[in-house]
Image: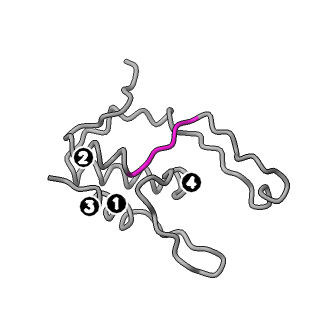
Amino acid sequence: MVTYEQVLDFFRQKLPQVRTFSFKIVPLEIDDALQEYAEFDDLVEAIDKYSEQFNIDVSKLNIDNYYPWKTSWFFRKWFKKEPVKQNKKPLTVRMFAESAKAGQWLYEYKKS
């Protein structure tokens, strides 16, 4: 049986580490939005490897529901109090873990 920790460890190994300005590693957590943690190309590659590792058909994952993701510019927090309004859903490790436990992608389907 696949665990949340196994899937989280998988993504922590496959995605580049994020660091602060003081070079501290920012660990990926299960409910972090992967769009904020990793570049699109890195995430697509990790998803392909996830599909192979956990034998999950990710062809039903509609990436258009998650991208483009709006990222805030560095100084925004000093000028605006409200967060960036997203019009896309966050893609999280928890979604991948729940899908791995179920043996299939559990979330939205591509329209045919």
Q: Are discs 2 and 3 less than 8 Å apart at CB?
A: yes
What residue is at 68 percent from the left and 39 percent from the top? 85
Q: Are discs 1 and 4 less than 8 Å apart at CB?
A: no
Front residue of 56/82: it is: 82
Which residue has dot 2 on it?
100
**Label whose residue precedes the other's in the sequence (2 or 3):** 3
Q: Secondary structure at mark 3?
A: helix
Furthest residue toward bottom: 22
**Label whose residue precedes the other's in the sequence (4 or 2):** 4
Residue type, mark 2 in image: Ala
Which residue has dot 4 on it?
36
Instruction: Give left or right: position of 47 versus 76.
Output: left
The residue segment tinted magenta is: 88-93
- Picture quadrant of residue 61: top left
- The image shows residue 9, relative to residue 41, as above or below, that is below
Which residue has dot 1 on it?
8
Q: How many marks?
A: 4
**Label whose residue precedes the other's in the sequence (1 or 2):** 1
The location of residue 81, given as percent across then percent down, is: 78, 50
Q: Secondary structure at mark 2?
A: helix
Furthest residue toward front: 81
